[in-house]
Image (tube, helix red, strand yellow):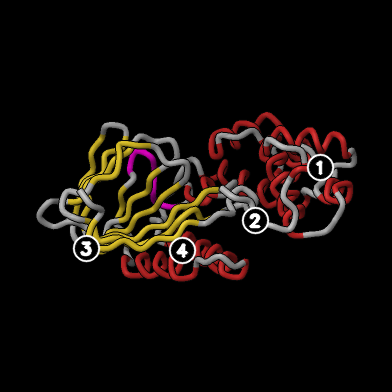
Amino acid sequence: MGPGLFKYSYKTKTRESLPIAIYNSGIQQCAPGYTWGPGLRDHFLIHHVISGKGVITVSGVTHRVFAGDTFLIYPSEMVSYTADRQEPWEYCWVGFQGAQAKLLLSQTPFAEEAPVTQFKETQQVQDAILAIYHAVGSTPASELRAIGLLYVFLALLVEQKQDTPSAEEPSLEYVENAVRFIAHNYSRAVDTTDIASSVGISRSHLYRVFMKHLDTPPNEYLTRFRISRACELLEHSPLPISAIAASVGYEDQLYFSRVFKKITGRPPSLYPRGEKKQS
């Protein structure tokens, strides 16, 4: 079965070097019965149904989806989705990933056990995704503009979340404050003790809330954040490796090079300079 009457999409190449990066975006009118999957995604993927209907099956559980609904696919989750044979859906989508992605989505109404929702302002959701799609491009300016619109879109989803008390809110706030501290202080010689102290909790408590909300220990988050910034500097600045290491909190260049290779698979001396990484 072909994909449908039309499909317009855009895939980006720069991914790992940003806290949040757009993988793809598009709009598609599906043919009757058109199915994607079963399969896994390596990123978060939000679809908004403009018209028609269909079903999405996540880990063996099937959800019916109608015009105005929005559904979220999580990374590494077995999923398939199928357009209705009488009223096939048209949808728009945006796919993204990055260190901040899971944390930001945890503040929206989406949940892995409830991947489908209908927001109060459905037209705004549709317009926000289409704005991202129209903004993406191959230039640095278009990339930044699209990422900015992605943050605006996620802010819209957060705003529409119902104001219900949650036992998770205090621990989520610790993570948010810790992530902000890392973003503002990664260039200094800070460690997990400093991070925990900045948010007023113990190191063990910090570890627990990071694992709960990000599935990543705080020391690993800090390391990957630093290396992502180092990648940006390697790509977009003429600084020598020693200066880049110091700029992201590593006084020992040899140690920086070992960590960099462990994260990226290659030493900084072999990392592309002055060009985008190819996916």
- Nearest to N terminus: mark 3 or mark 4: 3
- Element class at badge 3: strand
- Element class at badge 4: helix
Please state which amino acid type lies under the numbered disc 4.
Phe
Residue 153 against residue 198 in the figure, above or below: below
Q: Residues within 10 Å of mark 2 (few under 14, many from 20)?
A: some
Circle 2 is placed at which residue position? 276
In the picture, measured across the screen, residue 184 lies left or right of residue 140, that is right
- Element class at badge 2: loop
Please state which amino acid type lies under the numbered disc 3.
Ser
- Nearest to N terminus: mark 2 or mark 1: 1
First to last magenta residue range = 108-114
- Nearest to N terminus: mark 4 or mark 1: 4
Specify the farthest residue to the top: 204
- Does the image show residue 181? no
Q: Mark 2 or mark 3, which is nearer to you?
A: 2
Circle 1 is placed at which residue position? 190
Circle 4 is placed at which residue position? 153
Please state which amino acid type lies under the numbered disc 2.
Lys
Dots 3, 1 in contact, CB < 8 A: no
- Element class at badge 1: loop
Q: Mark 3 or mark 1, which is nearer to you?
A: 3
As drawn, the label of residue 51 is 3
